[in-house]
């Protein structure tokens, strides 16, 4: 079995803090340098693509045997989703009207999703604890954004962020999603830095998968798996950097908002029920 991170349990001019992240006020003052050009894909369309790739990843994990081309393809394409969600979480933070309400929504849907999540990924029996789902991870990432924005003391900020990163060890995409979030805070609005963020994230994820395969696969197979795992993040970088137009969908914003919240628990519940009653 190869490692599958979707199931991992484990005043404004004060300059840069010790971690190198500017305050929210400072970032907002920056001139956005993302050159969108004639890009066609809005934020909601990219999120719909992310939902589809996540579904493919979960189908691979729940129903398909690892090591075969189609299962590995579905698995690797699905890694498009987590880093895309982290990117939009950071991008949208400054536009969130009520950060308290947003955090509460994330917590509510994380709680709703937990049983379907465990049901879908239980390998033996009906229901076993599989760690905390990705919405808990996104909540932790959102708290990192709040700490970065609100805590002015550098030492206290670093301690709080480190604590939140450690807390993610109990969640899906442990460590990685918080690190992606910190990298996007560092690069926010600056196209070249965003490129570097995707490259660093891709290499980090490949290394993560390679380390997980040591002793389980031959060197060649392990390298192939690691390179394949990087493809989803590479695809996310290409889509966001070269096809994203920086806008939201003009119509259906309310539908899209609630669809994204509901899709996660609903699709996991369906996958879990199919696994239990049809296999």
Image (cartoon, rainbow, N blue to C red):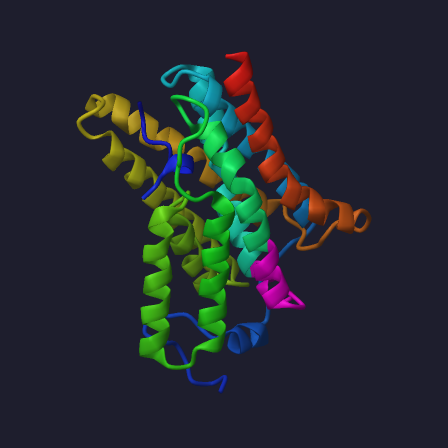
**Residue 127, position in %: x, y?**
44, 29
- Res 153 quadrant in image: bottom left
Name above or below for residue 47 compared with residue 97.
above
Report which quarter residue 172 is drawn in: top left
Would residue 250 appear left or right of 1 to someone viewing this image?
right
Residue 34 shows in this picture: no
Q: Is residue 106 above or below residue 233?
A: below
| Left or right: residue 84 compared with residue 206 | right
Q: Main secondary structure of the magenta part?
A: helix
Where residue 4 appears, as percent x and y from the top left, is: 37, 32
Q: Is residue 117 among what the camera can see?
A: yes
Q: Is residue 183 left or right of residue 87?
A: left
Task: Name which residue lies at 44% across and 34% down.
Answer: 231
Residue furthest right in the image? 251
Residues rendered magenta in the picture: 91-105
- Is 92 part of what is drawn in magenta? yes
| Left or right relative to 53: residue 65 | left
Q: Residue at x 45, y 73 (%)?
A: 22
Q: Is residue 265 magenta?
A: no
* The N terminus: image quadrant: top left
Residue 49 horizontal/vertical position (percent): 62, 36
- Total numbered badges shown on the rendered structure: 0
Q: Residue furthest top?
A: 279
């Amino acid at each position: 079995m190869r490692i599958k991170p979707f199931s991992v349990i484990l005043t404004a001019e004060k300059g840069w803090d010790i971690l190198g992240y500017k305050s929210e006020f400072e970032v907002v003052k920056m001139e956005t340098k993302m050159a969108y050009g004639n890009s066609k894909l809005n934020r909601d369309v990219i999120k719909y693509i992310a939902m589809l790739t996540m579904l493919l990843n979960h189908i691979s994990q729940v129903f398909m045997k690892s090591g075969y081309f189609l299962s590995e393809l579905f698995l690797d394409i699905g890694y498009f989703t987590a880093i895309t969600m982290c990117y939009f979480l950071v991008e949208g933070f400054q536009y969130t009207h009520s950060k308290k309400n947003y955090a509460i929504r994330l917590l509510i849907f994380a709680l709703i999703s937990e049983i379907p999540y465990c049901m879908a990924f239980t390998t033996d029996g009906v229901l076993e604890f599989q760690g905390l789902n990705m919405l808990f991870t996104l909540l932790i990432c959102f708290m990192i954004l709040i700490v970065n924005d609100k805590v002015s003391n550098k030492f206290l900020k670093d301690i709080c962020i480190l604590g939140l990163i450690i807390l993610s060890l109990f969640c899906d995409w442990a460590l990685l999603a918080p690190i992606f979030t910190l990298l996007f805070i560092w690069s926010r609005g600056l196209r070249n830095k965003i490129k570097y963020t995707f490259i660093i994230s891709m290499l980090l994820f490949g290394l993560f998968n390679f380390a997980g395969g040591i002793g389980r696969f031959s060197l060649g197979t392990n390298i192939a798996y690691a390179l394949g795992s990087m493809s989803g993040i590479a695809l996310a970088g290409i889509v966001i950097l070269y096809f994203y137009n920086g806008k939201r969908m003009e119509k259906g914003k309310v539908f899209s908002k609630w669809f994204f919240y509901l899709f996660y628990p609903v699709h996991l519940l369906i996958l879990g029920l199919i696994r239990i009653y049809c296999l």
